[in-house]
């Protein structure tokens, strides 16, 4: 494999990894930016999404025959993506219930209460997963191999998993959709207005209770969607929520606390630079994201971007 081919392959790995990080961090940064809550249970919502996906995708994929030609391959990809969206939708009432029943009564208390509560939720969700699916790791190899049977990258002379290209394409659509939602729709503007000035939003008739529940439910949706998309290439395990949670914190610190645009840029920076570093020096896999964060914070102590108000810039 030539140096150029290696470079392209590891860059694509980095972009794919960056989009997965963004899918996870987007929900976390939306919740942090608007509710001002550091949700320690977000990684477990991601893990819950992966486990729910093992059941939902396992069922819906079983309804269609294995892909053999272009038409059946297109149907297979559509069914998998539909299953991932359905999985994420399952997380919406979970997020709404957490916000309205557990978080809302303690918004006015010290932030330590929120941290303790979300840490307790982390443990509860992990035990709920263990109760529902057992301690054994689960995987959907049939989904990964089915989509990789489509020789998309070989059309340009590359040997690269088609499933990773699907993640990149879906991630790009999600980015465009999120920015359109927050910049162009009435509901998105209401959410941004609430984030910028909560008292003013309340004064003009915005229901902050309803907005906060919607925001937390959206955050849970994207955590679940990321878990569903990340499941096929890897195993879903009881410990899978910890690492993405930590890396999501790295992403939102680099991007700027509560900045969606910053989370997107930071996720790609961390994803690509981490894969390049691992390519050149494999033992750097764990340290690379934190080294990148340290270097960027030395230059930009407040992160690359500001808060929600900068989305118009």
Image: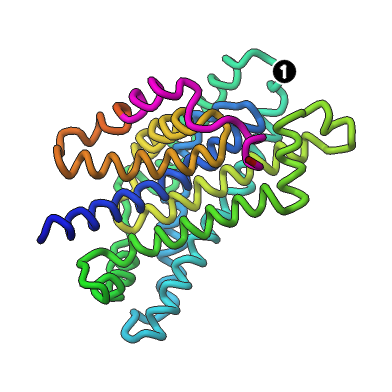
Q: Along the line of sight, which residue is nearer the eye, 50 or 200?
A: 200
> In the picture provided, is 210 more to the left or to the right than 92?
right
Residue 198: image location, x then y, percent = 77, 28
Q: Residues within 10 Å of mark 1 (few under 14, many from 20)?
A: few
Residue extending furthest right? 204
Q: Is residue 14 above or below residue 210?
A: below
Q: Quadrant of residue 86?
A: bottom right
- Segment tinted magenta in the rendering: 292-312
Residue 252: image location, x then y, percent = 48, 32
- What residue is at 66 percent from the left and 39 percent from the top? 97
- What residue is at 60 percent from the left and 35 percent from the top? 31
Q: Along the line of sight, which residue is nearer the eye, 269 or 227?
A: 269
Colour mapping = rainbow
Q: Quadrant of residue 257?
A: top right
Residue 114: image location, x then y, percent = 59, 21
Q: Which quadrant of the figure contains the C terminus?
A: top right
Residue 52: image location, x then y, percent = 46, 53
Q: Is residue 223 above or below residue 75?
A: above
> In the picture provided, is 194 more to the left or to the right than 299?
right
Residue extending furthest left? 1
Q: Along the line of sight, which residue is nearer the eye, 303 or 208?
A: 303
Q: Quadrant of residue 168?
A: bottom left
What residue is pinned by disc 1?
Answer: 108
The overriding secondary structure of the stretch rendered in magenta is helix
- What residue is at 47 percent from the left and 72 percent from the top? 79
Q: Along the line of sight, which residue is nearer the eye, 74 or 197?
A: 197
Magenta stretch: residue 296 in it? yes
């Amino acid at each position: 494999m030539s140096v150029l081919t290696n470079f392209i392959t590891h860059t694509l790995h980095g972009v794919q990894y960056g989009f997965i990080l963004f899918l996870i961090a987007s929900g976390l940064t939306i919740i942090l930016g608007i509710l001002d809550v550091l949700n320690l249970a977000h990684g477990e919502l991601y893990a819950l999404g992966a486990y729910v996906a093992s059941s939902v995708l396992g069922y819906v994929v079983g309804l269609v025959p294995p892909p053999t030609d272009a038409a059946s391959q297109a149907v297979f990809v559509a069914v998998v993506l539909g299953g991932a969206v359905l999985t994420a939708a399952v997380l919406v009432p979970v997020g709404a219930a957490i916000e309205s029943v557990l978080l809302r009564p303690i918004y006015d208390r010290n932030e330590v209460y929120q941290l303790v509560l979300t840490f307790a939720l982390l443990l509860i969700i992990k035990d709920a997963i263990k109760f529902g699916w057992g301690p054994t790791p689960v995987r959907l190899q049939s989904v990964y191999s089915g989509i990789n049977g489509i020789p998309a990258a070989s059309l340009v002379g590359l040997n690269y998993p088609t499933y990773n290209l699907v993640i990149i394409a879906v991630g790009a659509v999600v980015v465009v959709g999120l920015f359109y939602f927050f910049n162009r729709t009435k509901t998105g503007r209401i959410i941004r207005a609430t984030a910028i000035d909560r008292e003013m939003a309340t004064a003009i008739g915005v229901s902050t209770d309803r907005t906060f529940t919607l925001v937390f439910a959206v955050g849970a949706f994207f955590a679940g969607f990321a878990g569903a998309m990340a499941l096929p290439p890897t195993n879903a395990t009881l410990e899978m929520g910890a690492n993405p949670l930590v890396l999501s914190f790295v992403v939102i610190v680099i991007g700027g606390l509560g900045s969606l645009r910053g989370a997107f840029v930071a996720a790609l920076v961390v994803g690509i630079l981490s894969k390049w570093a691992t390519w050149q020096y494999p033992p750097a896999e764990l340290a690379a994201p934190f080294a990148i964060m340290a270097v960027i914070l030395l230059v930009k102590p407040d992160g690359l971007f500001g808060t929600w108000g900068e989305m118009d810039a």
